[in-house]
Image: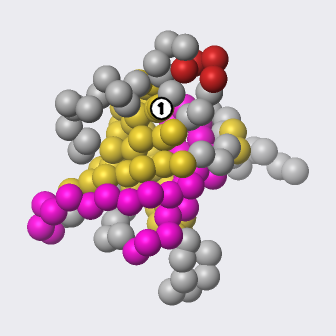
């Protein structure tokens, strides 16, 4: 395998976790929300699949919440990961079919947080 063409700055880990995303519709400003399943994760971005059709376009900014059921971290109330990122690519597994693959480049690094303490924060 030739790794000379690899352009990623950080390695990716394969991980299957629930992800929730939200964004403002680029044309109307309407709040868009959806759910998906993480495929892989790195310090610079992630890739996930989403079933329902949502009007996402490259360049759109998403707020992502990843449910990270990590018992050792739950002691500190940090069972979720939050990040903001830009949609860089949309992929269909089969034409006109779902799930839709969504590639994200982080704009702000992912952080751990406790959703019970974040109820007053804006979601998007």
32 or 46: nearer the viewer: 32
Tell me if residue 47 is in the magenta stretch: yes
Please give the name of the residue rendered at 63% of the width and 52% of the height, measured from the top-left corner: 39
Residue 10 in which image quadrant:
top right
> Magenta-highlighted stretch: main secondary structure?
strand
Residue position for label 1: 80
Q: Position of residue 22 (x, y in %)?
A: 31, 52
Q: Position of residue 20 (x, y in %)?
A: 42, 50
Q: Are there few (<14), some (14-19), or many (20+) residues within 10 Å of tag 1? A: many
Q: Which residues are magenta?
A: 27-53
Residue 95 in which image quadrant:
bottom right
Q: Residue furthest left?
A: 28
51 or 104: nearer the viewer: 51
Q: Is residue 68 left or right of residue 27?
A: right
Q: Is residue 33 above or below residue 93?
A: above
Tell me if residue 114 is in the magenta stretch: no
Please give the name of the residue rendered at 55% of the width and 71% of the height, measured from the top-left corner: 99
Q: Is residue 22 left or right of residue 52?
A: left
Q: Is residue 110 above or below residue 73?
A: below
Colouring scheme, one of rainbow, by chain, secondary structure, one colour: secondary structure
92 or 50: nearer the viewer: 50
Please give the name of the residue rendered at 40% of the width and 24% of the height, measured from the top-left corner: 114
Q: Residue furthest bottom?
A: 96
Please give the name of the residue rendered at 78% of the width and 45% of the height, measured from the top-left corner: 3
Q: Secondary structure at mark 1?
A: strand
Q: Position of residue 1 (x, y in %)?
A: 87, 50
């Amino acid at each position: 395998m030739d790794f000379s063409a690899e352009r990623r700055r950080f390695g990716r880990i394969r991980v299957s976790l629930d992800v929730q995303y939200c964004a403002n519709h680029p044309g109307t400003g309407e709040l868009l929300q959806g759910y998906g399943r993480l495929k892989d994760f790195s310090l610079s971005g992630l890739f996930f699949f989403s079933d329902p059709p949502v009007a996402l376009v490259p360049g759109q900014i998403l707020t992502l919440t990843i449910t990270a059921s990590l018992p050792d971290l739950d002691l500190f109330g940090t069972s979720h990961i939050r990040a903001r990122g830009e949609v860089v690519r949309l992929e269909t597994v089969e034409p006109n079919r779902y799930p839709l693959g969504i590639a994200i480049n982080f704009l702000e690094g992912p952080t751990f947080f406790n959703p019970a303490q974040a109820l007053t924060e804006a979601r998007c």
